[in-house]
Image (cartoon, rainbow, N blue to C red):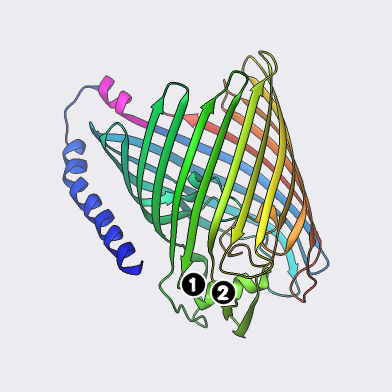
């Protein structure tokens, strides 16, 4: 599999190199302004956010500002590029008893996406670059992170049924650990996924079903150490270095259903299930959620209630979404949001309460409150 992944990643690099002359050509093009507007989109986002986290071992009160940019450009008929990134500036206070407080304030730059997409046929997409893992829609497995990756996708629609299948070969991002001189970055980490997704329009509502096979390989000692502090089973070697007890490969299954009650109200439900075949026990997780949306003109109000559980060895805790406990946690989450499509303004509030499944020295029950306000400016 390692040989296969290296071949695909070399193909990704080749695709990027082949596209460079096209990018240069486009930059010197004398095409008219209307075509540029049609082929190019640039948006700037501004956000304010706050987090309040409280547990026996960790506490944090953080406020921050986020400035981001999203851009897409059509390089040629079948070739396009998408970029999304920005910066966070935070202030506040935090305490930790085990050096595993993920909510401590800090300043950072981030790159969520920087990919080239080649579509030789309507049913085939080839992507290379930094690909956001939210495309998997599997927060128990991996969060909203950008990984260097290559992706091959197939999609086909017959009447009211859309079928898509894609495979992705990625290099997980360890950038938060790269500056620590006491950490051994052993391993050449890889993350593989193969997904089949079916979207079906029903007489009443829409349903989406998906199944993903995943596999991690060569997880570094640094990621292993951080994951142990966050709930995975393993053995710390020394500060900053550890070894996980299990391999991580298995299946993620998801089902979504939504239906309009009337012109203004929509109900939705979703269920996610994760199984790590690389561990013999404590290897499953799930999310069950119910949502309600009310829309009138440009105003949209939504609420979602979710119940979740993720056992200690279901997923690599360093990479998945913190909103669902990371590892060895169970709990509930409520999200309330307002969006204005006319002014591109969004406000949301989340409350999360989780409990430790198996007692250990690194984790404790936790309550988290998250507030955010975001404004999007469509430049062109």
Query: Is 154 part of what is drawn in magenta?
Result: no
- Tell me the CA gap for discs 1 and 2: 7 Å
Q: Of the residues under marks 1 and 2, which one precedes in the sequence?
A: 1
Nearer the observer, 346 or 142 = 142
Relative vertical location of residue 27 with respect to residue 115 in this rendering, above or below = above
Image coordinates for residue 36, horizontal then vertical, percent: 27, 26
Label 1 close to label 2 by CB (< 8 Å): yes
Residue 142 appears in the picture as rendered: no
Q: Which residue in the protein does label 2 denote?
A: 224
Residue at x 81%, y 62% (from the top left corner): 365
Q: Position of residue 375 (x, y in %)?
A: 57, 33
Residue at the far bottom: name it.
Answer: 238
Report if residue 141 is visible in the image.
yes
Q: Which mark is residue 219?
A: 1
Residue 36 shown left or right of residue 99 in the figure? left
Q: How many marks?
A: 2
Callout 2: SS? helix
């Amino acid at each position: 599999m390692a040989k296969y992944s290296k071949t695909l990643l070399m193909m990704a690099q080749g695709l990027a190199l082949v596209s460079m002359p096209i990018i240069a050509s486009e930059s010197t093009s004398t095409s008219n302004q209307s075509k540029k507007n049609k082929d190019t989109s640039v948006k700037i986002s501004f956000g304010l956010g706050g987090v309040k986290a409280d547990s026996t071992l960790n506490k944090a009160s953080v406020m921050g500002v986020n400035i981001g940019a999203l851009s897409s450009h059509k390089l040629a008929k079948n070739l396009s590029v998408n970029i999304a990134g920005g910066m966070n500036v935070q202030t506040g206070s935090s305490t930790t008893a085990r050096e595993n407080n993920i909510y401590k304030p800090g300043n950072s730059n981030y790159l969520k996406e920087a990919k080239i997409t080649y579509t030789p046929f309507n049913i085939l997409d080839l992507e290379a670059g930094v690909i956001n893992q939210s495309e998997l829609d599997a927060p128990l497995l991996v969060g909203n992170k950008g990984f260097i990756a290559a992706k091959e996708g197939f999609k086909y629609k017959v009447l009211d049924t859309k079928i898509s299948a894609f495979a992705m070969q990625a290099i997980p991002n360890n950038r938060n650990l790269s500056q620590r001189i006491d950490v051994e970055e052993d391993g050449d980490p890889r993350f593989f996924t193969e997904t089949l997704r079916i979207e079906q329009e029903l007489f009443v509502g829409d349903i989406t079903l998906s199944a993903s096979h995943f596999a991690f390989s060569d997880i570094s000692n640094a990621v292993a150490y951080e994951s142990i502090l966050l709930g995975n089973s393993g053995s710390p070697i020394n500060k900053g270095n550890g070894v996980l007890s299990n391999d991580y490969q298995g299946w993620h299954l998801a089902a979504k259903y939504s239906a309009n009650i009337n012109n203004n109200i929509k109900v939705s439900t979703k269920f996610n299930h994760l199984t790590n075949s690389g561990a013999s026990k404590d290897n499953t997780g799930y999310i069950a959620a119910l949502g309600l949306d009310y829309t009138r003109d440009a105003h949209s109000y939504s609420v979602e209630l979710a119940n979740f559980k993720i056992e200690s060895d279901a997923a690599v805790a360093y990479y998945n979404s913190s909103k669902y406990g990371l590892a060895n946690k169970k709990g509930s989450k409520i999200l309330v949001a307002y969006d204005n499509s006319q002014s591109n303004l969004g406000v949301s509030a989340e409350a999360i309460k989780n409990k430790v499944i198996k007692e250990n020295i690194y984790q404790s029950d936790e309550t988290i409150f998250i507030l955010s306000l975001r404004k999007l400016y469509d430049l062109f």
